[in-house]
Image (tube, helix red, strand yellow):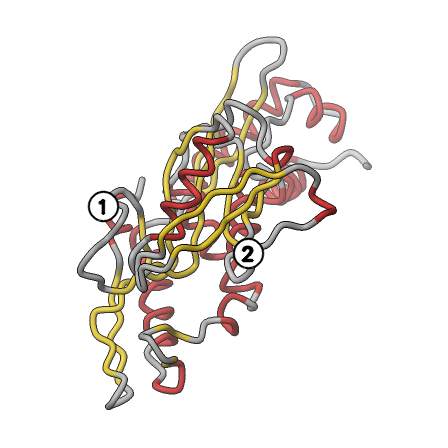
Amino acid sequence: MKKLKRSGRLVDMTNFLLKHPNQLIPLHRFSERYGAARSSISEDLGIVKEIFESEQMGYLTTVAGVSGGVRYEPAVSAREAKTLVESLCRRLEEPDRLLPGGYLYMMDVLGEPGWMNEIGRLFAGIYRGQNIDVVMTMATKGIPLAYAVAAYLDVPICIARRDHRVTEGSVVSINYVSGSNKRVQTMSLARRSIPEGSDVLIVDDFMKGGGTARGMSELLTEVNAHLVGIAVLVEARHSERLIDEYISLVRLDEVNEQEKQIKAGPGNYTNHLQY
């Protein structure tokens, strides 16, 4: 790269950090990239840090030492989160989304990269500083959301399934009870997908009774991994919840199948924002 003035360095540095969230970037990489002294790079990073935090875009964390560097940790302000969730609620209140059993059609939302990108950044900001090693979800609708969250956390994902695939090698399987209809179902996870001792964030697109999330947490116990938290995009009201600790973005306050009415509101995420 040709030698840049400070204004050019700041633009390129900001772009680089935004594209590499939660990655520790050694300072010498910036020095070599721009042909600038470390003192100049440190001053540049100070400017970027000030803007990121004043505009509530996230945090720049500096790690000292030979193997240290700087890390961009995404975050979302309360105002931005409120706008995002309100838009999502309006989208989910469309009457033609209602499916039998109180479920909602959500594949169009889960299939939009723009929505997933913003929701992934929001969840990554909520779980900032949790030392997550792996994001776990259930096939298949939760996969786009899990990838979005994992991309901002810079960690891999693993996928639990209701059917075992030969290509996944040896698996761990459990029987779990669905929280909504009390049916016993099977859930499997490839042994190689989660290293022993990993700290895992479970991501679920829709939760009624919480049986699927509880099943995934039980699978983690079987592979000697640790549950860090459960992130839920949409939760429905349910009299018997099988899990207590989770963070949701949207809560379905009312679902009237006869009149085709859906009322959605913010979930409990507001208690966990860092800005």
Q: Is residue 52 visible?
A: yes
Is 229 displayed left or right of 266 in the figure? right
Q: Is residue 57 visible?
A: no
Question: Residue at the bottom extreme?
Answer: 259
Residue sitting at 71 percent across and 25 percent down? 29
Image quadrant of residue 94?
bottom left
Q: Quadrant of the C terminus?
A: top left
Q: Which mark is residue 271?
A: 1
Position above or below: 231 against 38: below
Q: 3 and 18: which one is in front? A: 18
| Residue 45, position as x, y percentages in the image | 54, 29
Q: Which residue is mark 2?
A: 139
Question: Residue at the right extreme?
Answer: 2
Is 201 displayed left or right of 234 in the figure? right
Inter-mark Cα distance, 2 to 1 = 28 Å
Q: Earlier in the sequence, mark 2 or mark 1?
A: 2
Disc 2 residue crowd, few under 14, some 14–19, many 20+, Cα 10 Å: some
Q: Which mark is residue 101?
A: none
Amino acid at circle 1 = Asn
Is 82 displayed left or right of 146 in the figure? left
Image quadrant of residue 114?
bottom right
| Residue 141, position as x, y percentages in the image | 52, 62
| Residue 169, position as x, y percentages in the image | 70, 39
Residue sitting at 25 percent across and 89 percent down? 258
Position above or below: 231 against 69: below
Disc 1 residue crowd, few under 14, some 14–19, many 20+, Cα 10 Å: few
Position above or below: 5 against 110: above
